[in-house]
Amino acid sequence: MGDLLLSILMLGGLALLVGSLFVFRSGDRRRALLMIIAALVMFANVAIWMIPTK
């Protein structure tokens, strides 16, 4: 179940990055920056969850 959630989180982050490109092209730079920051937070969460534990 955890792998499924991490996969969904990665897909959501990629969707935010692609969406931010479209929003940036339309001229709304602040919203595009917020979307990029949200995607980076998602990727950081996945990276933290993937750290091996004993």
Image (cartoon, rainbow, N blue to C red):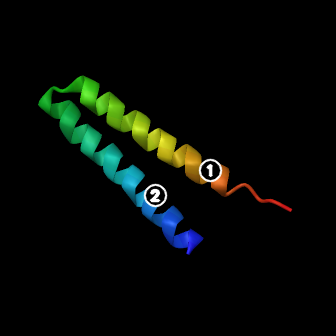
Spot occupied by residue 26 in the image (x, y as percentages of width and height): 13, 32
Look at label 1 and name its amino acid.
Ala
CA gap, disc 2 and disc 1? 11 Å
Mark 1: give few (<14), some (14-19) or many (20+) Cα within 10 Å.
few
Residue at x-position 24% and y-position 25%: 29
- Res 20 → quadrant: top left
Q: Say if 33 sits above or below 47 in the image.
A: above
The residue wearing badge 1 is 47
Q: Which residue lies furthest to the bottom in this view?
A: 1
Q: Which of marks 2 and 1 is nearer the N terminus?
A: 2
Residue at x-position 56% and y-position 70%: 3
In contact (CB < 8 Å): disc 2 and disc 1: no
Mark 2: give few (<14), some (14-19) or many (20+) Cα within 10 Å.
some
Residue at x-position 26% and y-position 30%: 31
Label 1 sits on a secondary structure element that is helix
Look at label 2 and name its amino acid.
Leu
Q: Residue furthest right?
A: 54
Q: Say if 48 sits above or below 6 in the image.
A: above
- Figure quadrant of the C terminus: bottom right
The residue wearing badge 2 is 9
Q: Residue furthest front?
A: 1
Spot occupied by residue 6 in the image (x, y as percentages of width and height): 53, 63
